[in-house]
Image (tube, rainbow, N blue to C red):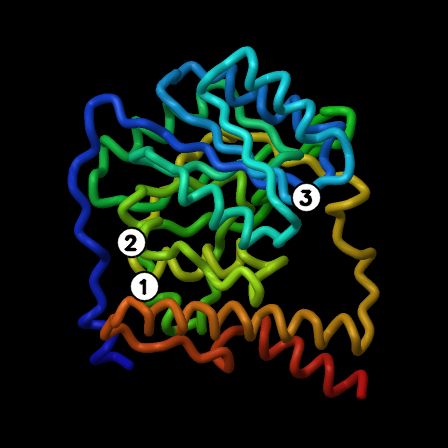
Amino acid sequence: EAEFAGRMQPVDLPALPQQPLVSVVMANYNYGPMIGDAVQSVLDQTYGRFELIVVDDGSKDDSAEIVERLVAKDTRIRLIRQDNTGQGGAWNTAFERCRGDVLCLLDSDDLFEPEKLQAVVDAFREEPQVGMIQHPLQVIDPGNQPLQVIPFLSRLEEGWLGPTLLRRGGRWSFMPTTALSFRMEVARTFFPMNAKRFRGSADALLFTVWPMLTRVRVIHRTLARYRVHGTNLMSSGAIDRKGARKQLRSLYDTVAGTNQHLDRLGSELPRLDSRRHLKYVEFLFLLSMLR
């Protein structure tokens, strides 16, 4: 392990253009009451050189119609409709259309602060060898009222984390989708993903692959708002055997998917071991107790 960790190196990145194009990607499924505000938060950015690619993943509500009305007002928005394939499939479709130098992710129920894109561009230009950026989030309720900032007590990790992820089996301190941005050179090493296998947990796979390949930087400002509501809240905390097995499967798939991507890249990096992942071990122990 020490030998491999010593040989691990982040990918080498060129400097960004003076005015890079930012590709904002949004996957949507039945978030009609919130998607209009999410799109508007991108249109309100102080940095104007962006494209917004919205993939409506087979919504049965009026989500697509809401976006279409906004597309008619601003040509920087592109709407793609498709049958439901899940988060991974929607991201694959969006990435095929990306033309930018920087990739920013936005969930269709969240919001960017107006200075988000400018701060991300500035940070990438200041440190050309950083390929991934994360920042804290302001948690809001369905009525847009602030609740708290996350992370609350923990500290976000940054720097070259490849050896750390190897030692921990893929575990590290990262933020949800809307707080993450990437250099496009790094994103190209990832897409397309296995959409069938990662229909609902594509974000966890993405968060684990990219820190194995590039340096991470933290911007210590709340540049987006993360909305909690009835369809994205986690359970009350009670867990049964079925729930423990589901968590185990998700963690195992994330580690296995990361290793699969490293295989595809032909990388000499060592592969992750789920038995080193603290959460995986915890749920194994919990499941044994429940049995």
**Image coords of residue 235 (percent x, y):** 80, 56
Q: Earlier in the sequence, mark 2 or mark 1?
A: 1
**Image coords of residue 182 (percent x, y):** 36, 43
Mark 3 and mark 1: span between their CA atoms? 37 Å
**Residue at point 77%, 34% (across, down):** 61
Marks 2 & 1, CB-CB < 8 Å contact: no
Mark 2 and mark 3: span between their CA atoms? 34 Å
Say how many tags the image has: 3
Q: Earlier in the sequence, mark 2 or mark 3?
A: 3
Query: At numbered mark 1, what does the secondary structure look like: helix, strand or loop?
Result: helix
- Name the amino acid type tagged 2: Thr
**Image coords of residue 290 (percent x, y):** 80, 83
- Name the amino acid type tagged 1: Gly
Mark 2 and mark 1: span between their CA atoms? 8 Å
240 lies above or below 214: below
Mark 3, residue position: 58
Query: At numbered mark 3, what does the secondary structure look like: helix, strand or loop?
Result: loop
**Image coords of residue 224 (percent x, y):** 54, 30
- Determine whether, in the image, residue 136 is placed left or right of residue 121: right
Marks 3 & 1, CB-CB < 8 Å contact: no
Q: Indicate which label's residue lies in the foreground, 3 or 1.
A: 3
222 lies above or below 156: above
Mark 1, residue position: 162
- Determine whether, in the image, residue 123 is placed left or right of residue 30: left
Mark 2, residue position: 214
Q: Earlier in the sequence, mark 3 or mark 1?
A: 3
**Residue at point 35%, 45% (across, down):** 132
Looking at the image, which is closer to me, 86 or 132?
A: 86
Looking at the image, which is closer to me, 231 or 161?
A: 231
Query: At numbered mark 2, what does the secondary structure look like: helix, strand or loop?
Result: loop
